[in-house]
Amino acid sequence: MRKIIIFIVFQINFIVFHHIPVLADSLLCSYEKIAQIPLRNVGGYIIGEIQINGYFVSVIIDTGSEGSLISRQGAEMLHLTIDPSQQTILMGSKGERKLVQNILVDNMRIGTYDFDNLSIPMGNLPEYPRIKPAIIGLIGGDILSNFDLEFSLQSQKLTLWNVTNHSILCMVPPFWRFKGNDTDLKQNGYRIFTQVKVDHFPLKALIDSGARSKIIAESTVKKMGIHPDMLATYPGGLASAIGSKDIIYHWYQFHSFEMGGLTEFKPILTVSPLYDDADMLIGSDWFAAYEIWISYKRGKLYFIRNSYK
């Protein structure tokens, strides 16, 4: 089973969405559903369906990526042209950097919400499923962070919300029948992090819907007393990522994983090299088990088990 680890670092000329209107109004408390798109889990890839220049395409929804990306094949298929004024530095999972061209997108429509006149980097994606409509890239934090995100892989929907919450008396979503769990988020650029514990060790975790599993850094488990020779006896495989050679990973059973007041016992986590400031990634296997609400504005991650929603 192959894993995907994607990081994008911006930039020579940073993408700024000046054309995005300010959605929040003057009210202390308000919420509005902005858009909703079909969402599915295909082999551990969280995939949404959007439109680019009027064509329906599939994209990986990647909260762990600083920015969005369109593959070279996708750019050719959609007849997109090079942006002569912007380039981007992509960083692979081994920390290597590569300068790439940006391409021009006249219109990107997510549900009924439009982004116009975008400049998006063009790069190679790792191996991904061959589905229809074809996967042509990924949508990262540069776009996703403009909204509250409601992930429901069980209902196969991604909903984008605008939430204004300027008072502790505000009643704003998520509205679930049962009380869920929540954890604080810290935003660095367009990526979001939280604190977790693995076997009672406090770790910094990246919320990464683009990763195909919960992945813990090889260097971190070594600090926890798990020697590489011990890991070598466990099953695993090879992972691919943008601009990188394959990476060896292993599956290892830990005693516990804790996040937001919820403890999972005997979790099997992927152990792999991570060249990032995170100790681990919270990937799509976790997203599949919960109804999830990410609020960039409020700095909160809310989640509830699918069976309790």
Image (spheres, rainbow, N blue to C red):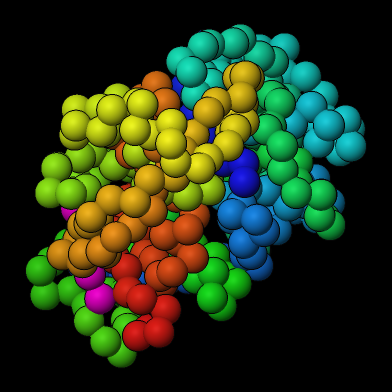
Task: In this rendered view, identify the residue nearer to me: 193 or 142.
Answer: 193
Task: In this rendered view, identify the residue nearer to me: 35 or 57.
Answer: 57
Residue at the image point whose x is 66% and y is 14% from the top = 100
Task: In this rendered view, identify the residue nearer to me: 214 or 77.
Answer: 214
Start-end of magenta stretch = 180-184
Q: Residue 109: tell me if it is visible.
A: no
Where residue 35 sits: x, y (%)?
A: 56, 65
Where residue 195 sits: x, y (%)?
A: 19, 46
Q: Is residue 299 above or below residue 124?
A: below
Asked whether 124 falls inside the magenta stretch, the response is no
Residue at the image point whose x is 61% and y is 10% from the top = 99
Q: Is residue 87 above or below residue 169?
A: above
Q: Is residue 305 left or right of residue 223?
A: right
Residue at the image point whose x is 49% and y is 55% from the top = 284
Name the image quarter holding residue 280. Answer: top left
Q: Is residue 199 left or right of residue 31?
A: left
- Magenta stretch, main secondary structure, is strand
Task: In this rendered view, identify the residue nearer to me: 288 or 237.
Answer: 237
Where residue 234 sits: x, y (%)?
A: 44, 41
Residue at the image point whose x is 60% and y is 19% from the top = 244
